[in-house]
Image: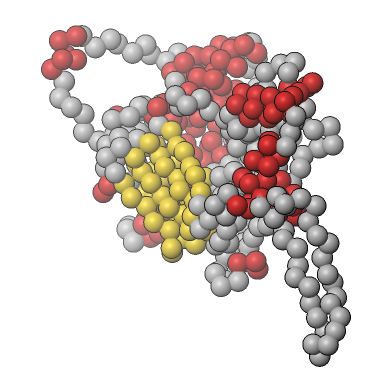
Amino acid sequence: MASHAAAGAAALAAGDYPAAITHYTTALNQLPSSPDYYTKRSMAFQRSSPPQYALALQDAEKAVSLAHKRAKRELIAAAQMRRGIALFGLGRYKSAGRCFEWARQSNEKETGLGIWEKKVETESKKLADLVEAKEDEDVTEVPEGDVMVKDIKPPPSAPVPPEKQASSPKPEGVQTPASKIRHEWYQTADTVVVTLFVKGVPKDQTTIEVQERSLSISFPMPAASTYDFSLEPLFAPIDSRASTHSIMSTKIELVLAKVTKGQKWPSLESKEPLPRDIDVTDQANPTTSGVPSNISTASAPSYPTSSRSGPKDWDKLAADLTAKPKKASTSSKGKGKATDAPSPPESPTEETYDSDEGDPVNGFFKKLYKDANPDTRRAMIKSYQESNGTALSTDWTEVGKKKVEVTPPEGMEAKPWDD
């Protein structure tokens, strides 16, 4: 049972939705009272190509009923979230909005909730300009009665004959399978650049929404499905008016302008929930415009170390060691006697750490290596090379025993160069 659930989770993460449906169906046959399995299978139905919203809704409502029996707020929120997304896909926007409200009541941290609430608001405004929709609004917080779910087996995909493959014209629209779409990001002092790698996105059918603490991208996929990509909440506020985006033949690129210039983002998204009343409007004074109190703009990332005394703040250490002695000051009347006279440097190289093209940190490490004994040098070289520059040790007795693993700063992930 657990192996099928784990296989279903892996297939879901890889974008292999038919396989995910198969594995979760097997897991549910063995444990039919699991709300999480129904929630995950609902997600697989919704993301299939084409989407199977009716089956996704059926699973989500069963998950809601089971989650309420267990009285688990996180399970209830996740199930209501999937229920709302399925209703949204069926065009029942008001009902979807109510499900998102119930999800927020159970768990405000539910991923993507704010994005979907915004979508409901947008569609509701469009409907307001049309004839009043005759939508059945008898949706209740907990589905009435026992929700029956039929045995579901995804139909096997028929192989395409070789002659048809050869004669098929080049597809129009998105050419990248959903499972192959990926994103990367990097940052400068003033911006965060997010790139979504996907080929053939139609510009006129793509919706991009950038807000102070979130962004969403939506575009049509083949077979009438829709691909949704969202980030919420972002690690820190951005200036949506100064941010830009461009849709190219092979990617979508967003340049997000930081509200707090020079702030280092250790990750793209924040683990803290976004307060509902957050308002980032005072661009001239970013320290009072919704920046979470746990964010420090002056702190640098803490890099791994093998030192038993814990990690060192290399920036501070280099700054202290490279600081030049103050010049002697005299009394205001000019008669006298010098005060605050510095001690002479201990060695001729004390004031030359910053001679490496203005980089005091680089100069400091060169000096450290130059004055080290052979074992310390070997430890520095081995630890730096084997860790791909993520660790630096001077203790050969520890480094010489085993390979130094790649340990990136907190909030970042190490990936092979091929990726």
Does residue 222 lie above or below 258 as drawn? Answer: above
* Residue appearing at x 57%, y 58% in the figure: 262
* Residue 335: x %, y % from top left: 83, 87
The quadrant of the picture occupied by the C terminus is top left
* Residue appearing at x 37%, y 52% in the figure: 245
Does residue 388 lie above or below 152 as drawn? Answer: below
Q: How many marks?
A: 0
Say left or right for 348 vs 169: right
* Residue 159: x %, y % from top left: 28, 10
* Residue appearing at x 40%, y 27% in the figure: 180
The quadrant of the picture occupied by the N terminus is top right
* Residue 35: x %, y % from top left: 64, 26
Say left or right for 285 vs 398: left
The residue closer to the viewer here, 192 or 138, is 192
* Residue appearing at x 43%, y 63% in the figure: 242
Residue 107 seen by the camera: no
- Seen as rendered, the residue at the extreme left is 167
Residue 314 seen by the camera: yes
* Residue 338: x %, y % from top left: 84, 77
Say left or right for 34 vs 139: right
